[in-house]
């Protein structure tokens, strides 16, 4: 990292709202642990101010930043270069400022796969996967699993048309079907891995579930990318069925670690990041 304009390298996250972001806590700790003179801040940027924020970031020499709701898609035309995965997904969550050139990446899908890997008992290439949801997060996860070469990836969603479109738009063709939530529920025992990506079950609607796990097999791995609450009603039901469960904090810290690597070339201590997140959320590990 060069340091042409400021004494301390500045990084941040832009979003709206962004006040409760856990990114400053984990990224600042990673900079301290790696002995890098840098500071990371949360910047509240309204939709109408996005262009001005990008101009300001360039003028101030901010070295890199994360992007969260609602700017992940809208930022794309304002950047100088987009890495191919982020371009295909149509959203960026990480930007590197390389000498005034802003380059966009998407680390959500890869972060999800990294968080899942330690829990796998079989290769992803041989796994039958069901993704619930077809929004932005599902898109990043589906595209990354397809690029990884996962055996079979079905998508189910309230709006089945959105699941069909997502499958069609993926540049890497995977063995996939688009299903209704009701049909997926009936066929649950076909799947080795279930990935819950809808916002159903998020605080304050903590009792809500996208579908019933009645037909699931106990050897399945069930993940929910929500981390507020840490253990959703969906994960609780999966645990009761004897399944291995994985909450959304893993994906969150792994996507952050990959962003840190893009900025610094160093891979941070993911466990340290995870401990900070768990402390902030006041939870225990799933
Ligand atoms: P999004 O683009 O708005 O997609 C929302 C998804 O939820 C869609 O599939 C939508 O179905 C479905 N949905 C919403 N309300 C529903 C309802 N009442 N009944 C049935 N389906 C419903 O959101 P996103 O950006 O993908 O984020 C989804 C969740 O992932 C959020 O909770 C977010 O916090 C979390 N997330 C976590 C991480 C992490 O690092 N752990 C990263 C990104 C996102 P339709 O298509 O039918 O509307």
Image (tube, rainbow, N blue to C red):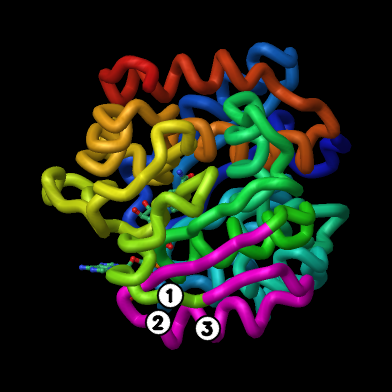
Task: Name the residue that disc number 3 marks.
Answer: 164
Gap between marks 1 and 3 measured at Cα: 8 Å
Residue at 76%, 35% (x, y): give it: 261
Identify the secondary structure beneath mark 1. Answer: strand
Image position of 129 (left or right of 152): left
Say whether marks 3 and 2 touch (CB < 8 Å): yes
Q: Nearer the viewer, residue 276 or 12?
A: 276
Q: Classify 123 as above or below 25.
A: below
Residue 160 belongs to the span the image colors magenta: yes
Task: Name the residue that disc number 1 marks.
Answer: 179
Q: State which mark lies toward you, 1 or 3.
A: 1
Say whether marks 1 and 2 touch (CB < 8 Å): yes
Q: Nearer the viewer, residue 128 or 27?
A: 128
Q: Earlier in the sequence, mark 1 or mark 2?
A: 2
Residue at 49%, 53% (x, y): give it: 190
Task: Name the residue that disc number 2 marks.
Answer: 160
Q: Classify 255 as above or below 246.
A: below
Gap between marks 1 and 2 measured at Cα: 6 Å
Q: Classify 281 as above or below 116.
A: above
Where are the magenta residues, as a range? 152-177
């Amino acid at each position: 990292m060069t340091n042409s304009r400021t004494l301390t390298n500045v990084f941040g996250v832009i979003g709206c709202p962004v006040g409760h972001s856990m990114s400053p806590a984990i990224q600042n700790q990673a900079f301290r642990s790696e002995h890098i003179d840098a500071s990371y801040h949360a910047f509240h940027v309204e939709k109408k101010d996005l262009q001005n924020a990008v101009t300001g970031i360039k003028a101030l020499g901010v070295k890199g930043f994360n992007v969260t709701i609602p700017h992940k898609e809208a930022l794309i035309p304002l950047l100088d270069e987009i890495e191919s995965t982020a371009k295909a997904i149509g959203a960026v969550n990480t930007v590197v400022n390389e000498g005034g050139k802003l380059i966009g990446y998407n680390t959500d899908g890869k972060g999800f796969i990294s968080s899942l890997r330690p829990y796998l008992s079989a290769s992803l290439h041989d796994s039958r996967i069901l993704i619930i949801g077809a929004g932005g997060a599902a898109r990043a996860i589906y595209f990354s699993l397809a690029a990884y070469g996962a055996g079979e990836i079905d998508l189910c969603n309230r709006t089945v048309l959105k699941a069909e479109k997502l499958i069609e738009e993926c540049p890497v063709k995977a063995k996939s079907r688009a299903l209704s939530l009701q049909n997926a529920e009936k066929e649950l025992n076909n799947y080795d891995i279930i990935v819950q990506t809808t916002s159903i079950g998020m605080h304050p609607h903590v009792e809500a579930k996208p579908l019933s796990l009645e037909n699931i097999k106990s050897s399945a791995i069930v993940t929910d990318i929500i981390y507020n609450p840490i253990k959703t009603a969906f994960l609780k039901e999966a645990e009761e069925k004897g399944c291995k469960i994985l909450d959304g904090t893993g994906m969150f810290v792994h996507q952050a670690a990959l962003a840190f690597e893009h900025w610094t070339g160093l891979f941070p201590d993911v466990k340290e990041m995870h401990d900070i997140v768990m402390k902030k959320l006041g939870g225990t590990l799933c």
